[in-house]
Amino acid sequence: MSSKWRGVHFVIAAAILAVGGIAVAVAWAASDAQPKWYSRYDEERPWFDGRHWDWFLDMFNQPSIKPQEEGTFQRFPRDSVPRTGVEPFIGATEIVGGQLRRDLEPANPTRATPDSIARGRFIYDTYCAVCHGVDGMAGTPVTQRGMPAPPIRMLIPLFSEAHLYNKARYGGPLMPGYAIATTRQERWDLVNYMKSPQFGRSAVQR
C-alpha cells in the first residue's frame, strides 16, 4: 500500500473515532451517569449560605448577587475571614453623645494628598457620578428618568468625613452600599476627593 493511501486510511479512522467520541459524550450527558455533584446541589453540605443557587454549579453562566437582590456576602464560609479584616458594624441609629455614631466614626486615617484625591476622583466617577453627576448636581440621565438622587455639591461641606465614609459603605434608603465594590482605602480616598476644592469642578478646571 502506498503512503498516499495509508494517509487517507489514517484520516478516515481518526474521523470515525472523533464522531464516536462525540456520540459517547452526548449519550453520557443525556443519561443518569453524571456524578451527584454535577446534577444536584448538596443540601446537606451547602458551600455559601444554604440557599439553592444553581449558578454555583454552572461555570459558564454566573449571574452575580447585586446589592438590591436577595442574598448576602456577609455570611462567609465557616472559619474564613477577608484578607483585609472586618470593620466593626455601626448601626444606623446608634447614638454617641447625642450624635449619630455614623457621623463621628471612624476617623479618617488617610491624608488628603494629591494622589489620594486623584484616586478618590476615579472612585467617584466610577460609582457615584452616574446618579449624582460629575459636578455633584445630579443632572444625569438616571435622575432625569426618575431616580431621586439629590444634588450633593452644596451639601458636602455640611457632612463629616465619617458620615461620607459610612454613606459610601452602607448606602441609604435607595442607594446601595458600596462596601463590596470598594476597599476601605478607596472609600477614604473618595472622602478626601469629595472634601477637596476639586470636587464638582469640570475636567477642564481640574
Image (tube, rainbow, N blue to C red):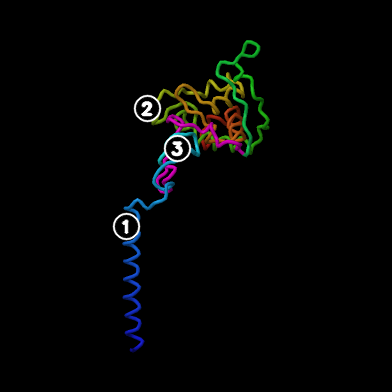
| Residue in the image at 50% along x and 39% along y | 47
Residue marked by disc 1:
27
Nearer-N-terminus badge (3/1): 1
Q: Quadrant of residue 63?
A: top left
| Residue in the image at 57% along x and 28% along y | 194
Badge 3 crowding class, 10 Å Cα cut-off, few under 14, some 14 to 19, many 20 or more, is few
Q: Where residue 191 sits: x, y (%)?
A: 59, 29
Residue marked by disc 3:
43
Mark nearer the viewer, 2 or 3? 3
The amino acid marked with disc number 3 is Glu
Q: Residue furthest bottom?
A: 1
Nearer-N-terminus badge (2/3): 3
Q: Left or right: 4 with respect to 117?
A: left
Q: Specify whether residue 185 is painted magenta.
A: no
Note whether residue 206 is visible: no
Q: Quadrant of residue 188?
A: top right
* Observer-nearest of 151 and 13: 13
| Residue in the image at 32% along x and 57% along y | 27
Note whether residue 35 is visible: yes
